[in-house]
Image (spheres, rainbow, N blue to C red):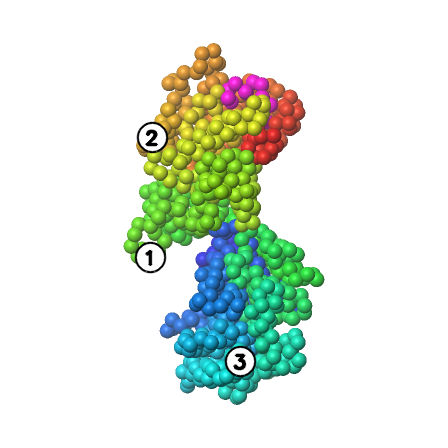
Amino acid sequence: MHRRLYGRGALFDVDPAGLIPRLVGIRPYELHAEKLEHPGGPPLLVLTGGRGLGKSAVLAELWDAYTDHTRRGEARRRTPVASIDCEDEQFARPPHEESPESWSPVWQALLVVAEQLTEPVRAAGQLTFPRLTAGLVAVRASDWSGRTDSDRIRRELVRILLLNERASRFALAGRWAAKVASKVIAAASGGGPFVAATVEATLEALSEGVTHRKEQKPATWYRSYPNAGGNAKRGLLLLAGNFRAGGTSREHAERWLVRALLADLAEAYSGLGSHLTRLGRPLVLLDNAGCGPGPGLLDAVLRDRADGAADQVVWVATVRGPDHPALGDAVRRALPDVARATDWQPGASPSSRALAVPLPPLSPDDTLHMVVAVCDDVELPPRFPHATHRLTGGNPLGIVLLATAARQHPEEAASLGRLLTAKVRLEEGQADEGRPVYAELLDRLVPADRVEELTVLAAAHGHASATALAQARLPDDFGSSGVRALRIRLTEEGLPDAAGHFVGDPFLRTLLLLRLHHRSADHTGWRETHETMIEHFATGRDFRTPNPGVDAFRLYHRLALGDTADAVAHLRDTFPVLATRTWLLTLRLLGTAPYFHAHDTEGRDADGDEDRRSAVALGRTDAGEEPPEGVDRALHLRIRRLLHAVWQVSDPLVLPDPRVCERLEFELLQLSDLRPAGGALLFATSRAWPRDALAGRPLSIPDEDGDDGDRGGDSGNGSAGNGNGGNGDGEA
């Protein structure tokens, strides 16, 4: 059974078997066979989703599930397993200053994968890779030509040749590889062409009987390389030439190297008795496969399988976002749908050989179990797990880091706002105090090269307001095109769109706005950013039209600075005349304005932790509030209480106050009696909003058919609170 993950049982369950044991043929954490699904060849499994949803954690769990440890602490695989992170630095550039014509991320990845697959496996012989060895040597040989640093060449050559050496208790590892390397270097140092001499010496070494009979296969396998004319040496020279040529020629050569790896694996799993000594399929894990060597590996495997070159390797890759060029015709299944069977049938295209499964957010129950597991015996507020799930939306990374911070700072767990700014230590025995939780989360949830831009643009609502912010607060070369490019990148990474917000994910938006607020001690950047938005919506396109959406967004940013008077006045004055649904949309939008610190009556930051919104919503400050002359005092105070109630229950950093929810219901009920034409909608909303708030859901406006007097107007002004009618900025 999976030991550390929550909400991923469809992948790891044993009885009945989940997806992974059905594909691999071995139960996780056991050396127990499981009936194979798709015995003719498994799909290439691709786990998709945004950052923080646990894709890397699933691969780490897979590694542990199929790796055993002896009493001496030595790692022993239950089946051959290899794992690489395609974003790792070793795949970004060559390890030395050699010519790039003889190296690529795919070449490096194949070397690393094969090295890991040669590690010992319980109750099975060691894997060797003679075909891949020959191909990798042939490609690298051109870089070694003419070099005088023979020690470096020897080290690189031995590393490759070790892929074909069987370890033995009677022989030191590397003895054969070192012997062959000396022969290859000596042969290549002669007067003939270096690459040809290296290839010939390698083939001779693999065929001269110093290795097992199966390792002699390269002498015949490369004869089938296109235009080789049945000559293995010529085939390898053509392979090396195509690799050095770059472009599509290199892609062709890389496909043959991948095919060599798979042919070596097929050789190890075939023949007399192999089914008795090898239990389960080999497993290759590719994290962040959308970059580095990932696309090349995925394309090579999928195209070869589509061409009929079937293999039994279980490839599990992760990519960010819902789509990837390699997944055009992939079979797509929700995680619960693959718990018992995949119902996967490949089509004609290469991408149909992939099975794409998005990882969903965790449920409230999963969040509870994860928090309890992390915090162990630490006593936390009873509603902390609920608050954590409400803020994170079930993002596993967010849950783990918040729970870790709560374990280290239990005195701060009553306020998620304070907890996010507390410093967290992520490693045992860490010397320093660590960094704020929100900074650690943003490092993992946001592209590192765009965190500064997103910190500013998180305050925007659509393209127009984001462009206004970019022009005022970002470098001159960013501009409108930079805004569009960043929006596309967020979509590609799986971050959802949300009407009325440039950064659609509420959790990420909260973290970015928190970072904006804390960039300087006096919150200068925070104020200037919101002042830019206020100016944009006060003087921007269509600002003179009666579109209430423009007013709503302007007032939203005034609220973020602590100025509530204008928002109260707008809601009070438009209540008798504005379509009820539009008025509610505006109220709902205003209630989502960020509120990171208690504010004084003049809108300035105040020390302390008191949430003034609750006091206002419950009527405790009514006596000190003086409405403008000529204004209905009762209506003014009711609207003021209602706004602060919605503002408090919509804040993702605090739990809704049940008393405030009761007051919210009461105020809406009273307003329904004042507006007969929209009374049915207000009545339905008075029941829906407290229910939504206490359940941790966004406030929903009911589809109330009884609101006949407002339906026509509402449909024409639906953009007022959510941007649906325009560009996300309340503009038509």
Residue 525: x, y in percent? 40, 36
**Which badge, 1 or 2, is on the more N-terminal residue?**
1
Residue 407 in sight in this render: no
Q: Return the residue nearer the eye: 41 or 543.
A: 543
Secondary structure under the numbered disc 1 in the rendered image: loop
Amino acid type of the residue that numbered disc 3 sits on in the rendered structure: Pro
Secondary structure under the numbered disc 3 in the rendered image: loop
Q: Residue drawn at (46%, 40%), measured in percent from left and top?
A: 474
Q: Return the residue nearer the eye: 34 or 356.
A: 356
- Residue named by callout 1: 428
Residue 123: x, y in percent? 49, 77
Q: Is 671 above or below relative to 119?
A: above
Mark 3 neighbour density, 10 Å: few (under 14) some (14–19) many (20 or more): few
Q: From mark 2 to mark 3, how far is it between C-alphas? A: 78 Å
Give the number of the mark in front: 3 or 1.
3
Q: Residue drawn at (32%, 33%), measured in percent from left and top?
A: 608
Q: Residue drawn at (42%, 85%), measured in percent from left and top?
A: 171
Q: Residue furthest front?
A: 191
- Residue named by callout 2: 606
